[in-house]
Amino acid sequence: MSTVGESSRRLMAATERTSGKLRKATTSRGATIAAFIIAAVWTIPTFGLFVSSFRQADDIKTSGWWTALSNPSFTLDNYAQAFASGDSLPLSKAFLNSLVITIPAAVVPILVASLAAYAFAWINFKGRNTLFVLVFALQIVPIQMALVPLLQLFSDGVKIGGLYILPGLGVNGLDGAYAKVWIAHTIFALPLAIFMLHNFISEIPDEVIEAARVDGAGHGKIFSKIVLPLTMPAIASFGIFQFLWVWNDLLVATVFTSGGELPITKALQDLSGTYGQSWELLTAGAFISMIIPLAVFFALQRFFVRGLLAGATKG
């Protein structure tokens, strides 16, 4: 039995003990009652919106959603109209656009940040601490301040001495529309992703890494066979946050895409009409837009909880 396997089991056992302690502290009767009350208060408006999405427009404008419970009269017309509405950007097309934008914009930062976090945690190189502090400090840069420089970068590229290091991506056209928003979201996500994953990766016991080195493993094998599996809860936790941030984004997508490449948030903005007179369609569109985020959250929920609990206390 290898030393790496033994060290990994000790790490997992310590994590399980820590999770058990936290679970015991947060599952008392008082905490459970408080959690149910808070959940109920937060759920009531969402439930009301859900009921309204199945009601006729006239019923919505003349009575509250709770009246539908005593005199039910539901229809799927709002969902059908929401999907079909929009000439240049139907909700169905915007839904696909959001998938095309969000999946790469969530996966690419995780791949780059996990490699960078491993380097900061376990590879000694000159200026490592200074560079990590600079990366951490980038979190305080507002997105709005970076929009104009990025627009200029995508439009003109990077030119040094008459030689284009990075060509422009045609910001005024449709060429590279998705690439621009992928790059923008990746840039904005990397500082926080590197910081979060570095904190998790650096908590891996030295014995695990040293045992792998003694067995002849290089950085690539250590990262892929040891660090990546142990870091999966933290990766899933950040992945959920990043997916939700990008899926719900309107500013970045509106700046770097246009026309038929805009996401579902832009379609929802236009769905209620100029003066908000069609907000019954907005209720249906809102729940259509929630399908994918809910599926992602429930699929990664167990990893998300483990990522939040791991490293909270010493086991």
Image: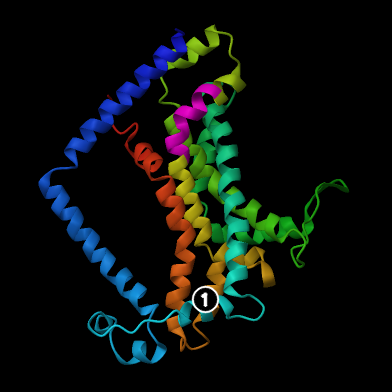
Tell me the chief SS of the magenta region: helix
Image quadrant where one finds the N terminus: top left
* 248 sits to left or right of 153: left
Q: Nearer the viewer, residue 292 or 308?
A: 292
Q: From the viewer's perspective, tell me whether residue 28 is left or right of residue 51.
A: left
Residue 83, horizontal then vertical, whole percent: 55, 75
The image quarter in which residue 204 lies: top left
Is residue 231 highlighted in magenta?
yes
Residue linked to disc 1:
269
Kindly identify the residue that appears in the image at 50 percent across and 50 percent down: 242
Residue 45, picture quadrant: bottom left
The image quadrant of residue 307 is: top left
Residue type, label 1: Gln
Where residue 148 appears, x then y in whole percent? 65, 61
Residue 100 lies, with reference to residue 112, above or below; the image says: below
Magenta stretch: give its range.
225-235
